[in-house]
Image (cartoon, rainbow, N blue to C red):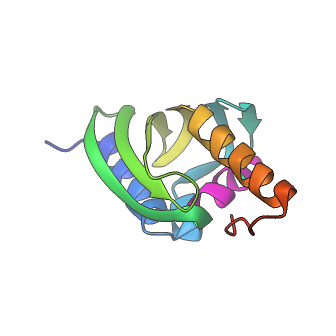
Amino acid sequence: MSSAALDVALAYHRAWAGGDLDAALEYIAVDVVCEAPPGRLEGVDAYRAFMEPYVSQLLGVTLLGAFGDDSTAVVMYDSATRLVAQAPGAECVTVVDGRIAHSWFVFDRLPFQAARAAQAAVVGSGDAEAPAS
């Protein structure tokens, strides 16, 4: 089943999951509001700054499920990054005039924080060089 918001959410998802953040941002409103674990982000520039480090780390993304109606869609996925092997997440979006106007990200930051701490410990010990992140 297809709906306007779901179509936009899936096109956006396919673009960033494929590593093309510029194409993904074509589906984001200039004045987007994003609720995410790091806090509230406002505007497409803040949104890009939030997404860019994650998208640049992606090794693969598996779509787990998606549903929506004419104005709202939810997409759940699992991703593998250079930093963590498994990073499940979900995004609930509100679409206005064909663009995502509001996004609510849900994901667990703890695995990323633990991996960064482990990298810092390895680098700090001088035993080995941490992988690029």
Q: Residue at x 84, y 63 (%)?
A: 126
Judge whether 52 appears above or below 19 on screen: above
Quadrant location of the C terminus?
A: bottom right
Image quarter for residue 49? bottom right
**Closer to the camera in the image, 67 or 121:** 121
Q: Position of residue 7 (x, y in %)?
A: 31, 50
Judge whether 26 appears above or below 117 on screen: below
Does residue 82 belong to the magenta stretch? no
Quadrant location of the N terminus?
A: top left
Q: Which residues are magenta?
A: 45-55
Q: Position of residue 81 (x, y in %)?
A: 51, 58
Residue 113 seen in this snapshot = yes
Q: Of helix, strand and loop, which mostly describes the magenta segment?
A: helix
Q: Residue at x 61, y 48 (%)?
A: 29
Judge whether 61 appears above or below 108 on screen: below
**Closer to the camera in the image, 131 or 126:** 126
Q: Position of residue 59 (x, y in %)?
A: 45, 66
Image quarter for residue 111? top right
Taking the image as shown, residue 42 lies to the left or right of residue 81, namely: right
Q: How many marks?
A: 0
Q: Position of residue 110 (x, y in %)?
A: 61, 32
Taking the image as shown, residue 126 lies to the left or right of residue 97, namely: right
**Closer to the camera in the image, 70 or 110:** 110
Taking the image as shown, residue 43 lies to the left or right of residue 56, namely: right
- Furthest toward the left, the residue is 1
Residue 45 seen in this snapshot = no
Q: Residue at x 25, y 40 (%)?
A: 65
Taking the image as shown, residue 28 lies to the left or right of residue 5, namely: right
